Image (spheres, rainbow, N blue to C red):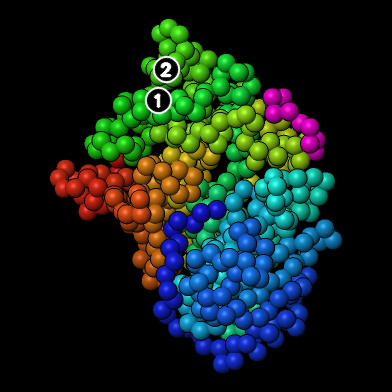
Amino acid sequence: MNIRCAPILLATALYGQVQDPATSCANLASLKLPDTLITRAQLAPAGQFAATPMGVLAPGAPSFKPFSLLPVFCHVTATLKPSADSEIKIELWMPAAGWNGRFQALGNGGWAGTIALNTLAAAVARGYAVAATDTGHVANPVNGAGAAFAFHHPEKVIDFGYRAVHLMTVQSKALIQAFYGKAPAKSYWVGCSTGGRQGLMEAQRYPADYDGIIAGAPANYMTHLLAHGIWVAQATLKESASYIPRSKYAVIHQAVLDACDSLDGVKDGVLDDPRACRFDPKTIQCSGEDSLTCLTAAQVAAARKIYAPATNPRTGREIFPGLEPGSEMGWTGLAGGPDPFSTATDYFKYIVFENPSWDYKTLDFDKDVARADTMDRGTLNAVDPNLKGFVDRGGKLLLYHGWNDQLIAPENSVNYYLSVVKALGGADKVNDAVRLFMAPGMTHCAGGDGPSSFDCVTALERWVEQKQPPDRILASHVASGKVDRTRPLCPYPQVALYRGSGDQNDAASFVCKNPR
């Protein structure tokens, strides 16, 4: 998970001062919490914390740059065991001085299994007490964070699905109360991808856990999202003739820009709303022999399937949206081969079919997707649009998604947002509590041709604490370490429209309005 909306800033607001932080921190080791074993409670000296990139503590290992900026903080680790097969690791970092009075929790990516300590460091540098969890399993250091942990371990699936995050939240708040002598004034969730799904799960299942939630590119419809991963694999990898070499991605991408870049009034290599683009890859089909500058007929058919939604072959109903025009440079993730996207195949291998030898080519998009839905029963899927419990207590949900997302089709976030609008009685009733920001040109969680660096944490704080809803969020594009473009991100369905004069790389030249 790359939380680009949470930059490192030095803590400034003083909320609580611990009189004897070393003793107060050490005393946490004896705190009795349900199903919890506290394995560490000690002060980390200023600028001296060290860890390995996988989140495993390793004293003496080279530290990341963010660690050298850290103040003294109380470092707590614990293992939670809500079931006989649970082994949920959590990290909680609390500034010894300069606490801003807030609690922040950080989400995971993929199948989790790690704790991104550098993101914890960024939050502590802002003055937060901050926590994260591995969700109950340790990623395979060789194969990464796959789903093999779930094979014949239903309790671990529940931990990953929702239990680990909720219990981390409850126990972290208890530890914060014990350390500072007061509860956090406000609690925030920040996550993208799996972390976005976790945030939505919290809002749906445990609406009192957080006052504000940032859910980026949420993988919230997991059964259908992962079926879509197989959809693309079958379209591009099942038959060798359908495979689109990576060397052709740029050709397709340029053809998209040639056809659609000027539709939004600004020719800048970014599509403000790619749904307006009617690009057909047949326009670059080879007229003769195959070459690197065109697509064969089989490749045209494959590209069309990548853009198209995955559908049920019997009913024709959409299973999951397709990738958008403009995303082509990132197609490696789902279509680059030689094997399918492992996050998707692992789900069907280890959870749905419980068969490590399962072949993705056999997936039936009618009965097998229905089977996955029936088995899940809301364990992984976080699609409930009824956020009344969260909204009624004043909760704020800030959703964001990049239009060039190459792993999670961005229209999934639009669909979920619209379902919430419908469930809660219309946009006017939702606007003060739930807003969606679509980022043109941004890929999965961060990066891409469009401005993708933005501070949604501050925007959420102002929304929750000062009742100032974000009407626009300033985003920047960085190249070679320098900002070369800024643009406002607008609350859906608004888009950033060029005023007709001024620098097209300057956000001041754009206004948020409903699309023409």
What residue occupies the far left of the structure in this picture?
501
Crowding near the residue tagged with mark 1, few <14, some 14–19, many ≥20 C-alpha atoms within 10 Å: some
Instruction: Give the SS element for disc 1.
Output: helix
Mark 1 to mark 2: distance in Å?
Answer: 7 Å
In the depicted structure, whether residue 30 falls above or below residue 404: below
Q: Amino acid at mark 1?
A: Val
Disc 2 target residue:
294
Instruction: Looking at the picture, tell me which residue is in the foreground, 439 or 483.
Output: 483
In the depicted structure, whether residue 338 falls above or below residue 300: below
- Taking the spot 75% from the left edge, 83% from the top edge, the residue there is 30
Residue 422 screen position, x and y as percent: 48, 46
What residue occupies the far bottom of the structure in this picture?
19
Magenta part, dominant SS: loop
Question: Which label's residue is closer to the chain start, 1 or 2?
Answer: 1
From this viewpoint, is residue 369 visible? yes
Instruction: Give the SS element for disc 2.
Output: loop
Q: Are marks 1 and 2 in contact (CB under 8 Å)?
A: yes
Dividing the picture into quarters, in which one does residue 435 lie? bottom left
Disc 1 target residue:
251
Residue 339 screen position, x and y as percent: 64, 31
State the extent of the magenta-drawn residues as a range: 354-363
Residue 285 screen position, x and y as percent: 42, 14
